[in-house]
Image (cartoon, rainbow, N blue to C red):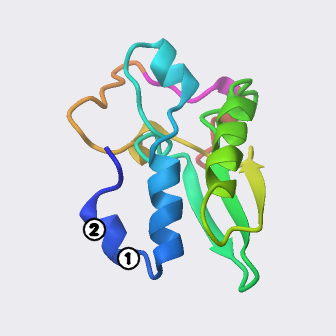
Amino acid sequence: MIVDEAFRERCASPLDHAVSTALSGIYDPCSVAAGRPKNLFEMGLVLGWEASPEGALTVRFCVTFAGCTMAPHFVEAARRELLAINGVTGVTIDVDTTFFWTPERMAIDGDREFPDYQPQAWRKRSDG
């Protein structure tokens, strides 16, 4: 999957299209290891990006849990792909480890089934 057409329509510029295409070609290492490869968009790990007029790009990712040891791998892959885009002069990547990721962020493709999913104990929210 590259990026769905609805997302592409929301992209305002050729740079947005190039960024979305580059990020959709990068796969979450844990999903690959589990035999169910999902790209960063399908996993719901892309929070957004901004580009300055000079071409400096800032991208925000989240992770499935704060202790994720695989984030450096997809961050480096993203940096490499994004720097290859014409007009991008620099890339800053922020990984928001406080963002509360759940499987509902994943793309719905008939493959999102986590019947036993429970947030990590330290991430459970109180009702009060």
Residue in the image at 65% along x and 38% along y? 77
Res 99 seen here: no
Q: Nearer the viewer, residue 102 or 118?
A: 102
Relative side of 22 to 73, left or right: left
Relative side of 126 to 15, left or right: right
Picture coordinates of residue 13, whole percent (x, y): 47, 80
Q: Is residue 119 magenta?
A: yes
Label 1 CA crowd tier, 10 Å (few <14, some 14–19, many 20+): few
Residue at disc 2, secondary structure: helix
Residue in the image at 56% along x and 30% along y? 119
Label 2 CA crowd tier, 10 Å (few <14, some 14–19, many 20+): few
User: To which residue does mark 1 refer?
Assistant: 10
Res 28 seen here: yes
Q: Nearer the viewer, residue 46 or 81?
A: 81
User: To which residue does mark 2 refer?
Assistant: 6
Residue at the extreme top of the image, as rendered: 34
Magenta stretch: helix, strand or loop mostly: loop
Residues shaded magenta: 117-121
